[in-house]
Image (cartoon, rainbow, N blue to C red):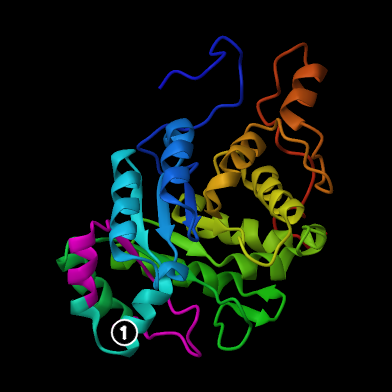
Amino acid sequence: MPRTFEFLTVADRTAKPRTSGLTTLADFGIGNSCVEATLELWHEVIDCVKVSALQITADDKAIRRKIAIYKKWGIDVQVGGPILELARLQHKEKETFERMRDMGYDSLEISAEALPTQHTFEEEKSFADLALKYGFKIHGEVGKKFPGGDRLRKSPTELDVDVAAREIQMYCDLGCDFVYFEGHLLRAIIGDNAEHAPERGWQITEMARKVGQDKVVFEVPFTYLSYASKRILQHWLVTALGPNVNVGNVQLDEIAELETVRLGMFPVFGGAGGDHPFIASSAAHGGTAAGDWWKVGVGAKPGGRG
């Protein structure tokens, strides 16, 4: 797809089909006409969409139309995670998979973020095998919104890096294309505005190094956080892991902002080095940005202890 002003150099972005630089949406109930109009502009930078469980009481025909719109633009459509958690609790996995297949869903998330406890490996493997048998792509998720029952945490604000890497690899071994890292765990570690990134950001970067960051989609919460905080956390991910970090839970009406953050051309107020870093680097180097223009010194060094 040719972009506008194609003769101007911008930061490199991966192209579809891609395994790095993924952007996954959280569709929380936006109208179908808005979906269609927005995807006309941005379909090339969107890889997957979670049709949120918030829409479980919406009109079935309308949801089917929504799924068809996303698929028309080449976007993988994933069912909202809590729907599968309910199905598992009520022992209606097969019935749910049959309905999902009939509706046109492509993928699902294997998670337990809303449950009091997390599943055993054997339970997850059985569920993954059944999903694959029905023809779905599967994605994992690690971490919980709240500290209770979260195996990944040493404390409410501290990640057990080794456990996190091990759980991510477990989901990959089950056949998952990628694994979501719970957004509310991310904000618990580095802060709502990345204010704790200097002392705790190493936990995220070290986990990504151990497991391979292309396996992980880092969610930024689309609920709770302010608009500014979401941009700051997305900007921190770019500065810590590069413009082609995988980012999830993006709202459709904010896709333009994320893409511009990735390109280093967005004014991220409150983010370290947030003053248009690609343009600033270009200005400092005779019009050509440095190869690592995104590295603005946020987050601790690998190991992070000094």
Q: Amino acid at mark 1?
A: Arg
Q: Is residue 68 in the magenta section?
A: no
Numbered range of the magenta stretch: 96-123
Q: Secondary structure at mark 1?
A: helix
**Near-viewer residue (77 or 66):** 66
Coordinates of residue 44 in the picture (x, y in percent) = 43, 33
State whether residue 45 appears in this view: no
Question: Left or right: where does residue 110 sit relative to residue 95?
Answer: right
Q: How many marks?
A: 1
Q: Position of residue 93 (x, y in %)?
A: 24, 80
Q: Residue at x 80, y 44 (%)?
A: 297
Tell me where residue 78 sits by quadrant: bottom left
Instruction: Give x and y (percent) for residue 140.
Output: 40, 66
Residue at the spot 47% in from the left edge and 69% down from the top edge: 54
The one of 244 and 112 positioned closer to us in this rendering: 112
Among the 4 quarters of the image, the one containing residue 256 = top right
Q: On screen, 6 above or below 171?
A: above
Residue at x 74% of width, y 63% of height: 190
Q: Which residue is mark 1?
A: 88
Residue sitting at 37 percent across and 86 percent down?
A: 120
Residue 182 pos. (x, y %)? 55, 67
Can residue 36 be seen from the camera position used here?
A: yes
Tell which of 159 and 72 is nearer to you: 72
Would you say 40 lies left or right of 153 here?
A: left
Lateral position of residue 67 relative to residue 134, left or right: right
